[in-house]
Amino acid sequence: MTAMSENKKLNDWINEMAAMCQPDKIVWIDGSDEQRNQLRAEAVATGELIELNQKKLPGCYLHRTAQNDVARTEHLTYICTSKKEDAGPTNNWLSPPDGYQRAAEIFKGSMKGRTMYVIPFSLGPVGSVFSKIGVELTDSIYVVLNMLIMVRCGKQVLDKLGTEGDFTKCLHGKAERDIEKRLILHFPEDNTIWSVGSGYGGNVLLSKKCMALRLGSYLARQESWLAEHMLILGVEHPSGLIEYLAAAFPSACGKTNLAMLVPPEGLTRKGYRIWTVGDDIAWMRIDTDGGLWAVNPEAGFFGVVPGTNSTTNPNAVATIRKNTIFTNVVLTKGKTVWWEGADGDPPESGIDWRGNEWHPAMRDENGKPVPGAHPNSRFTTPISQCPSHTFRMDHHHGVPISAVIFGGRRAHLAPLVYQSYSWQHGVFMGATMASERTAAQYGKQGEVRRDPMAMLPFCGYNTADYFRHWLQMGQEMTRPPKVFHVNWFRMDETGEFLWPGFGDNLRVLEWILDRCRGEAEAVASPIGYVPTPSSLDLTGLDLSGAVVDELLRVDYDSWFQEVEGIKEFFAKFGDRLPHALEDEVNSLHRRLTTYQSAANG
Ligand code: OXD
Ligand code: MN
């Protein structure tokens, strides 16, 4: 190996990891097009990537993961802190010595006959106050090619790191890709991540969930900032004013679609323009103006493919036409790709995500259609290709956040939108978010699970301490963003969604931003400020008054039940739960009782 860096700590660590994994050779990733092309060619030669029709999809490739390796494996994901309480009741825990030892047994000699790639990367604009440097070692070209899209990589990062700089040590090895020998381990006290036995993005692109969220959140608490599972988008008014929102939704609840939304027909007269900053992760700091400013630490989207089409997300469709890696979708005869919910008719036949012959009429033993693409199939694509991408991507200060939005997938409980009474109440709203389990995680689908701030699988320390940190951040800001909760997924009694969603969600964002400027009407309710029906601009939407009322209704009985559910959830955290959150659940209960008795006369 010829080291590309003179950073001793980096070189010593690489040597130590190489001694354990025993790769045949070590290759440094410099970020050049030349090296990328060479790696693509190598991956095509070995079958790791399939080259797609380069006339129709220039720079696009298809990858298939192993069948047992198609989603994040939360039950094999651990936070390894010296004290178990520091990982908290919502994380799996191993002691650091135990974690290192178990993973080392799998890593040992696992790279024999393979190459170890060294990927230096920066989360956030290189050299900005937000930026954190990481180095990922991996034996997977697929990981390298994805990282080259997802984060700022290569020589510029090493130059910034210099001879003395510190970095997050990220080690990934495919090993045998055996679920019995798979571990995703985080050592926040050592600024280290070890992931072994998987080839699925969320487990192996270590910059993403592992570093930007799990280790990121740990560092953020130490350094007084926030690392969040949030999209960021800007809404530009015809006057040129751009206001930015950050929104947390659990995995696969439409963050990517919202981040790239296209204004609906009925609002085009208002001349809004949307700017996409990020679709998954926000790093936010208090700036000298006392407000919260955010960057997207990533440079690419790793988005869920099924359902992506010109109606649900025209900007994504335009983004993924070139330089995109597709994972686990259908390969057509003409070497293009297809997925359930794509534009146009399905191909007559193709090869499915498992690599088998497939045609759209195929049915399983229960008579259900056999999907050609995996429900959690993905695209990896550069943000810079998105027609709505922000022009502030590399600005070192990021963008100022006017509103923080929490959202879940609640079929009955939560109204379309409501605003918190205070920052503390907003933290309570985020802490008690709940949603249904989706295809992005293993487990029973449809089940409701609490997912505080959409960080349940991503908080790198005790979630009770994380709530305390959020409360503390509110104390430190003189101009905190306003906090809201949205629910696009309310259903009628026949199970139909009441709200059209997608582009029409801008109507709700408009109300939110108007509220931030003190301009939209609302009524106080036990759960927060709810819009008056006339304060939402529903021009061009065919919704009856009864449906709008239902969308905005606060059902006291369900909320009394919710209070019980919240208390049960909070009990998990014992004494570590901040008192402020207990106060909030008691206040919610009190308000419900007061409003209900007023309503009953
Ligand atoms: C993701 C996830 O992949 O949240 O973004 O699972
Ligand atoms: Mn996510």
Image (cartoon, rainbow, N blue to C red):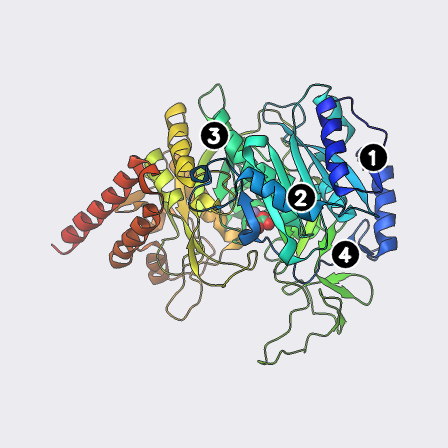
Q: Nearer the viewer, mark 2 or mark 3?
A: 2
The alpha-carbon separation of the residues under discs 1 and 3 comes to 35 Å
Three-letter residue code for mark 3:
Arg
Dot 1 crowding, Cα within 10 Å, few <14, some 14–19, many 20+ = few
Residue shown at the point (70%, 69%) measured from the top left: 346
Dot 2 crowding, Cα within 10 Å, few <14, some 14–19, many 20+ = some
The alpha-carbon separation of the residues under discs 2 and 4 comes to 31 Å
Residue shown at the point (77%, 56%) measured from the top left: 62
- The spot of residue 110 in percent (x, y) is 75, 48
Q: Is residue 302 visible?
A: no
**Sequence-wise first label, 2 or 4:** 4
* Residue matched to label 4: 62
Q: Quadrant of residue 467 in the image?
A: top left
- The spot of residue 212 in percent (x, y) is 58, 37
* Residue matched to label 3: 221
**Sequence-wise first label, 1 or 4:** 1
Point out which mark residue 104 bears: 2
